[in-house]
Amino acid sequence: MNEIYLDNATTTQLDPWVAEEMRPWLLEKYAAPTGHFGHQASLEAKEKLEQARAAIAESINAQPEEIIFTSGGTEANNLAIQGYLKSLKKPVHVVTTAIEHESVLNTLRALQKDGVELTEVGVDQDGFIKLEKFNAALRPETVLCSVQLVNQEVGTIQPLAQIGRICAKKGIPLHTDAVHGWGMVGLDVKKMNLALTSLTAHKIHGPKGIGALYKRKDVKLSPIMYGGYNEFELRPGTENLPGATGMAKVIEMMKPEHIEHIDKLRRMMWDAIGSQIPWVHLNGSVDRGAPHILNVTFDYIEGESILLRLDMQGIAVATGSACFSKALEASYVLLAMGRPHEQAHGSMRFSFSRFNTTEEIAKTLNALKEIVSDLRKLSPLTPRKEA
Ligand SMILES: Cc1ncc(COP(=O)(O)O)c(C=O)c1O
């Protein structure tokens, strides 16, 4: 394991307090909360599940019966989009953005084969949705909009309250993928006029494999998996009670001082990079971005080379391109922001958690300065005079 972990937007360390909260529900109280067994153990489990549901509902200003537990953000996004469109049984048009997570974009693109019409609205050079384009994309036959709260690569916070107002005025339900905003930035389903909201636990020190979908009471969904009658008949399968317990605990643990600390680390990192390393560009916005994500392009070098060199020094970061997961492709998010291919390839994502320290950031900065300078000396693209 790396000594310094700055890839917290991918996933985070499980908070030991959260693990403690989950422990009894893994080892001693392992009965299924599916109430129909009726024995004491299952009744106790059911009560705990409902407590977790209520805590998660409260965190977003929802009612407990509006929360459906899922296996994470991917499933919540699929249930929201597929479940909602399936319930309509008519030709539909959906509006989303070009920078959504794959679990939204690929779901919608797959549905195009079944006749769903899709508009992917572009973003500006900082990664914010173009509101006038969004407005113009809405049609009488638009049945759903899906706009994320925080972008997974560049951390931009979309103006969801404004988007919610536009959708409400036109009577179009709004879904948000809030996987990267929950616990980090304001999220209020009522104030934002949200019909559907996807959450996950593992981005803020909760366990992996648990998430939730908020479904406003009046919104109709069809199940996308079939089996038993759990989760209001919308999500079959034995409930992940340890996970739900951990998810409820993690949102309780998230305090304003943690967010301030994370934000301080991000600003410290950008201030130093921006002032001490030449030929860099910020992708996103420091002031209008989430506290935990910083994305920077280092001109003339590849993000992967920086990543590997940092990794050799025990520091884990992510690149903005998907080179390790797919054939050499630049990040679609950065391309949608208008970055040329070579800049998209030279980008790095640093993402922070409350367990990171200022010492770790200082150490990373020192390593980064040296690595960037070294790689630029080797790069034929570097302007020679100043290299
Ligand atoms: C914005 C966004 N949505 C959805 C997901 C998927 O969440 P999960 O890993 O819980 O399935 C991710 C994961 O990286 C994400 O960044």
Image (cartoon, grey):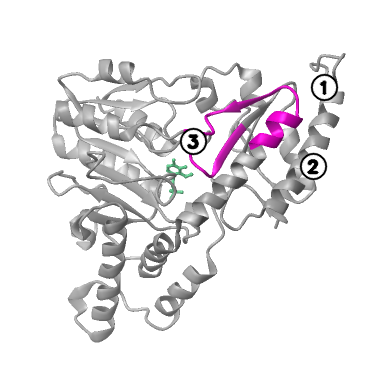
Q: Tell me: is circle 1 under 8 Å from ligand 1.
A: no
Disc assigned to residue 256 = none
Quarter occupied by residue 324: top right
Q: Tell me: is circle 2 under 8 Å from ligand 1.
A: no
Q: Give, as a single range, the part of the protein colored magenta.
A: 270-295
* Labelled pair 2, 3 in contact (Cβ < 8 Å): no
- Number of residues whose C-alpha sits closer than 10 Å to that of mark 1, classed few (under 14), some (14–19) or many (20 or more): some
- Front position among marks 1 and 3: 3
- Viewer-proximal residue among 25 and 184: 184
Q: Name the residue beneath numbered marker 1.
A: 379
Residue at left offset 21%, top offset 40%: 84
Instruction: Inspect the magenta stretch and tell me whether residue 90 lies in it.
Output: no
Give the residue type that dot 2 points to. Answer: Asn
Real-space CA distance between mark 1 and mark 3, rounded to the nearest whole angstrom: 31 Å
Horizontal and vertical percent for residue 57? 27, 57
Horizontal and vertical percent for residue 315? 72, 48
Disc assigned to residue 366 = 2
Give the residue type that dot 1 points to. Answer: Ser
Residue at left offset 52%, top offset 17%: 338
- Number of residues whose C-alpha sits closer than 10 Å to that of mark 2, classed few (under 14), some (14–19) or many (20 or more): few
Residue at left offset 29%, top offset 25%: 95
Work out whether residue 303 can be spotted: no
Q: Name the residue beneath numbered marker 3.
A: 289
Horizontal and vertical percent for residue 55? 30, 63
Image quarter (top left, top right, bottom left or bottom right) of the N terminus: bottom right
Q: Label 2, secondary structure: give it.
A: helix
Horizontal and vertical percent for residue 128? 43, 26
From this view, report whether residue 314 is shown above or below residue 387. below
Give the residue type that dot 3 points to. Answer: Gly
Quarter occupied by residue 210: bottom left
Real-space CA distance between mark 2 and mark 1, rounded to the nearest whole angstrom: 20 Å
